[in-house]
Amino acid sequence: MNGWQVAEVSPLALAYIGDAVWEVYARNRVLQRGIRRPAELHRAATGYVSARVQARLADALWDHLLDEERQILRRGRNAKSAHTRKSADVLDYRHSTGFEALLGYLYGQANLERLETICALAAGYVEHWQASEKPTQSARKGH
């Protein structure tokens, strides 16, 4: 399907493709929510793809993963990168790399059903966190 073998690429290469997979999934999810204005689309998608959120996802998904998937997440998390994002804490960056490596692995294995399951579960967590962090109507009015 993709012209490369999972066993032949590094955890960072898996994270590279996993980052793109998650970005597309997140953008689709945002469009499904009815958001249409470009600035709002960008802001909403960032809520799914930030290193901090992806690090939280790596932890939240742990109990849902198979042993093989946990190993990939660990390998991605422990991979030594030459750089980190300026906007990300080093630990968040490493954990988010593990999350991305997991998605890259599932994509590379052409295990699209499992990939969809993990992405849907991850998006559900993000949306739950976003809903619980929004101030209530009475809190916004100062009540």
Image (cartoon, rainbow, N blue to C red):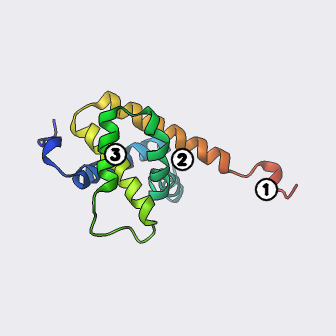
Residue 104: mark:
none
Q: How many numbered circles are shown?
A: 3
Q: Could you say whether the residue bearing mark 3 is in a helix, strand or loop?
A: helix
Give the quadrant of the N terminus: top left
Could you give the CA–CA distance between mark 3 and mark 1, rounded to whole angstroms?
39 Å
Instruction: Report if residue 117 is visible in the image.
Output: yes
The amino acid sitting under disc 2 is: Ile
Q: Name the residue under label 3.
A: 73
Name which of mark 3 and mark 1 comes first in the sequence: 3
Residue 140: mark:
1
Q: Few, some or many C-alpha atoms within 10 Å of disc 2 (few <14, some 14-19, many ≥20)?
A: some
Q: Nearer the viewer, residue 17 or 94?
A: 94
Q: In this view, does 49 lie above or below 6?
A: below
Q: Name the residue at the top extreme.
A: 113
Residue 35: mark:
2
Looking at the rendered image, the disc whose residue lies closer to the viewer, 1 or 2, is: 1
Q: How far from the left and from the top, in percent, is residue 86?
A: 41, 72
The amino acid sitting under disc 1 is: Arg
The amino acid sitting under disc 3 is: Leu
Q: Few, some or many C-alpha atoms within 10 Å of disc 3 (few <14, some 14-19, many ≥20)?
A: many
Could you give the CA–CA distance between mark 1 and mark 2, rounded to whole angstroms?
22 Å
Looking at the rendered image, the disc whose residue lies closer to the viewer, 3 or 1, is: 3
Residue at 73% across, 52% down: 135
